[in-house]
Image (spheres, rainbow, N blue to C red):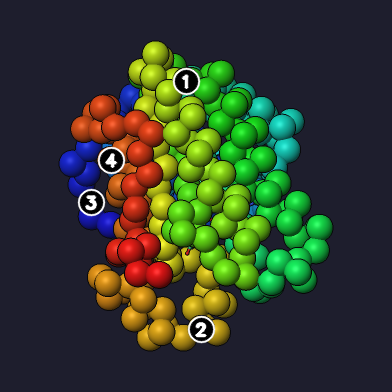
């Protein structure tokens, strides 16, 4: 991450779910660098979230964090209320919090519990948080929702995850049309492998070389590689982009 941003989001107020680490934390820092005030949503990692808040404040913006389980409606509403109370408004919403059950399992072996948990964490959460966010957002804002290559091409032995991320894509496109009259653009970002805690065990198990061989650009993304395109989609440069799913996966979605 550089110390300057080409993008100016001064005065904008942003809520990032899953902001305590990984992709969400990188987005918080890049949005703050661009001048946006930040609410860091997290579930359990308070110390990590507070560190992200400090990093954001070092760029001279307002920042706060709030614990909320976004797979519930009540917590999602509370998170949005806290954002408006702390920051004064809401212009940018990033729906990023999610899970990837690391152990692959065939559909015939998949338990009801696993299926329902993944759907609850990855798409019920997007429904609850996005609904609460758009009720509070000022017109002219931006919504960005995090999908995955798995949501486009499927992922064998992770059908629960792939289905939940595919749902994020159709949800994004539906909302883009609904919110057009409010000049709120709604886009998705679809990462492939990103070097975060979510997949660190899987990278170790599968082997870095094998994974890298499946990515035309020849490396796994960093969280900052995903954050930059998210910030772009929230910027004045992207006002006429809506309903788009931006692939940020080094071309891996083209290869399998
Ligand atoms: N990493 C990849 O390779 C990859 C690839 C494609 C797509 N994605 C997607 O990108 C997004 C972020 O992934 P990541 O790799 O940054 O994940 P990560 O490092 O595991 O971080 C997950 C974040 O989500 C939060 N979270 C999870 N469940 C939550 C809940 N129910 N309520 C509130 N917060 C919750 C966590 O909060 P705590 O810290 O408090 O636990 C944490 O901030 C996910 O939607 C993921 O599916 C990731």
Left or right side of 166 for 229: left
Q: Upstream in the sequence, badge 1 or badge 3?
A: 3
Name the residue furthest front.
Answer: 108
- For marks 1 and 4, give the one nearer the viewer: 1
Q: How far apart are marks 1 and 3 (CA)?
A: 36 Å
Q: Distance between the residues labelled 2 and 3?
A: 34 Å
Residue occupied by mark 1: 178
- For marks 1 and 3, give the one nearer the viewer: 1
Q: Nearer the viewer, residue 200 or 246?
A: 246
Residue occupied by mark 2: 206
Q: Which residue is drawn at 35% across and 39% down?
A: 244
Q: Upstream in the sequence, badge 4 or badge 2?
A: 2
Q: How far apart are marks 4 and 3 (CA)?
A: 16 Å
Q: Which of 241 and 109 is in front in this view?
A: 109
Q: Upstream in the sequence, badge 1 or badge 4?
A: 1
Q: Quadrant of residue 173?
A: top left
Q: Upstream in the sequence, badge 2 or badge 1?
A: 1
Residue occupied by mark 4: 232
- For marks 2 and 1, give the one nearer the viewer: 1
- Near mark 4 (Cα within 10 A), the count class, few <14, some 14-19 or many ≥20, is some
């Amino acid at each position: 991450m550089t110390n300057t941003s080409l993008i100016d989001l001064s005065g904008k107020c942003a809520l990032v779910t899953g902001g305590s680490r990984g992709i969400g934390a990188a987005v918080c820092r890049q949005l703050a660098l661009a001048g946006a005030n930040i609410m860091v949503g997290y579930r359990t990692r308070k110390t990590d979230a507070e560190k992200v808040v400090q990093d954001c404040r070092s760029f001279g913006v307002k920042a706060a964090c709030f614990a909320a389980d976004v797979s519930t409606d009540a917590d999602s509403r509370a998170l949005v209320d806290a954002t408006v109370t702390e920051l004064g408004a809401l212009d940018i919403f990033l729906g990023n919090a999610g899970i990837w059950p690391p152990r692959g399992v065939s559909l015939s072996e998949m338990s009801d519990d696993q299926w329902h948990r993944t759907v609850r964490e990855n798409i019920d959460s997007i429904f609850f948080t996005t609904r609460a966010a758009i009720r509070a957002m000022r017109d002219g804002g931006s919504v960005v929702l995090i999908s995955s290559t798995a949501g486009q091409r499927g992922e064998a032995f992770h059908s629960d995850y792939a289905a939940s991320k595919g749902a994020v894509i159709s949800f994004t496109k539906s909302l883009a049309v609904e919110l057009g009259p409010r000049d709120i653009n709604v886009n998705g970002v679809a990462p492939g492998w990103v070097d975060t805690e979510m997949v660190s065990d899987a990278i170790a198990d599968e082997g870095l070389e094998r994974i890298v061989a499946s990515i035309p650009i020849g490396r796994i993304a960093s969280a900052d590689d995903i954050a930059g395109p998210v910030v772009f989609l929230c910027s004045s440069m992207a006002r006429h982009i809506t309903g788009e799913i931006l692939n940020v996966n080094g071309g891996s979605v083209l290869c399998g």
